[in-house]
Image (cartoon, grey):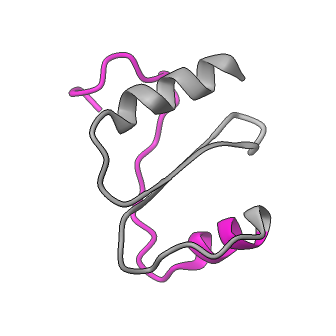
Amino acid sequence: LDNYPDLPGNTHFAKDIDYQVFKRVQRSLQEALPLDFPVVVAADDQGVIRYVATGYQIGTAGHIVESLRKG
């Protein structure tokens, strides 16, 4: 997290090894997500998904911060 000083203090990074969270996110979004690319999900403190990105993208951290600030 030291490389991303603009992220909120309660930010967590996690790797979903057994795809349990991945499956819950797919159900919540009612949308199929790719298994062969990275998936980034940002949720607010209420658990509302505010940002989803799939694949490799430049600037993901900045987009997450912008999405969470908009609320």
Residue at 36% across / 60% down in the picture?
55
In the image, residue 25 above or below residue 62: below
The picture places residue 52, in percent across and down from the top left corner, at 56, 50
Image position, residue 7 (x, y; %):
42, 23
- Magenta run includes residue 22: yes
The rendered magenta stretch, by its main secondary structure, is classed as loop
Position of residue 17 relative to residue 5, above or below, is below
Segment tinted magenta in the rendering = 1-27
Query: In the picture provided, is 70 more to the left or to the right than 4?
Result: right
26 drawn magenta = yes
Relative to residue 8, is residue 63 depicted above or below?
Answer: below
| Residue at screen point 49% across, 24% down | 65
| The image quarter in which residue 60 lies | top left
**How far across and down, in percent of the image, does residue 1 sit?**
29, 32
Q: Would you identify the image quadrant in which residue 70 lies?
A: top right
Query: Looking at the image, which is closer to me, 10 or 48?
Result: 48
